[in-house]
Image (cartoon, grey):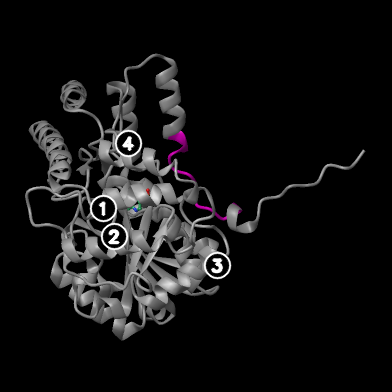
Amino acid sequence: MSKRVFIEPAKRVKHLPPYLFATIDRMKEKSLSKGVDLIDMSIGDPDMPTPRHIVECMRRAVKNPAHHQYPSYAGMPSFRQAVADWYKRRFNVSLDPKTEVLSLIGSKEGIGHMPLAFINPGDYVLVPSPGYPVYPVATLFAGGKSHQMPLLAKNAYLPDLEAIPKGVLKKARLMFINYPNNPTGACADRRFFRRLVTFASDNNILICHDAAYTEMYYDGEKPLSFLQIPGAKNVGIEFHSLSKTYNMTGWRIAFAAGNKDAIAGLGKIKTNIDSGIFQAIQEAGIEALNTDDRVLKKLRDTYQKRRDLLHDGLTRLGLRADKPEATFYLWVECPKGISSMDFTVHLLNNAGILTTPGNGFGAPGEGYVRFALTVPLKRIREAVQRIRKII
Ligand SMILES: *Cc1c(COP(=O)(O)O)cnc(C)c1O
């Protein structure tokens, strides 16, 4: 008999921050097992199906044997061209599909690999807080240190670049930002992006803009691409995803665009780890990028109705939240004196509504909960009625 090996997780795994949603997960399970009619507004995953023309394209593409072999690492030339055409149409930004576009197996994948490509042990990565947890975790996996940039209401949820300590700045190599923002729903204006280009250039910091929500906008102005700013391509790249825009979270397709050295560096990591996206999915991705705007307008209208209903309902109950101009999230202030976790637990146990506690996205998110607009109007109406009884 062989002796059982002692399987010990690597230090980087042991050093992972505590999983703040574990308690919530347990309580959710408990509610479900008790048969509670749960309204789950905790997940940023579209509840509507992928548009039909995209599914049909996939159905045709999957039959093509040419797609059954290994895909090209950087993405099919036709997919990268479709990305460049989309950028030109949507943002009037020109991209060289050969050197300035890279396909990704979801933007989470690209974001997660970015620090591996550019961060040495001890280097700093500047991350927004509250923010998408992948930024600090990917930094940790690469041996880097993250410095949190608080996103506060008084600064319109934009990071205060002047507040970053000089010592950190000297060792900072990379910055993640994300607008329209998850979880706050905030958008960045041109002025902020302009300052960011100068800041990055002055301090030699690679900007990684997570732009997963640029197409999920409402009545205001359309969100900007970071690459629309003069000089942006000298300092950064942008991550886009087909996940939220086209209800394709399960398909795993996204892309990075911008600075060619950054694209090449990320590509180098990826060629050594993965082998690209199933080409049939890339065909469907091309179809998605060419979606008639009327189809997308309908999706946006659906979210806008949900946003208005939830925002009006919560406001009437005395809960405060900005009305987001983009994203499908409402960043709601907890009633005075109640913590994020306590309010989340109260909503779950007494109203059967699942939300995400703001501090789960980082300490500056304390005092908020995030509602995702990923349930139908009828359920939002029901949720507001339930909250009325417990507030
Ligand atoms: C959903 C989301 C992503 C990831 O999207 P995928 O392309 O599905 O991996 C990235 N960033 C933010 C902020 C998100 O909310």
Quadrant hosting residue 131: bottom left
Identify the residue shown where x is 40% and y is 52%: 106
Q: In the depicted view, which residue is nearer to us: 176 or 314? A: 176
Of discs 4 and 2, which sits in the foreground? 2
Q: Is residue 16 left or right of residue 349?
A: right
In percent of width and height, residue 99 lies at: 38, 74
In the rendered view of the protein, which quadrant contains the C terminus? top left
Q: Earlier in the sequence, mark 4 or mark 1?
A: 4
Q: Earlier in the sequence, mark 2 or mark 3?
A: 2
Q: CA distance from mark 4 to mark 2?
A: 33 Å
**What are the residue bounds of the magenta stretch?**
14-23
Residue holding disc 2: 82
Q: Are marks 4 and 2 in contact (CB under 8 Å)?
A: no
Q: Which of the numbered marks, if any, corresponds to residue 42?
A: 4
Q: CA distance from mark 2 to mark 1?
A: 7 Å
Residue holding disc 1: 289
Amino acid under label 4?
Ser
Residue holding disc 3: 143
Characterize the magenta stretch by its predominant secondary structure: loop
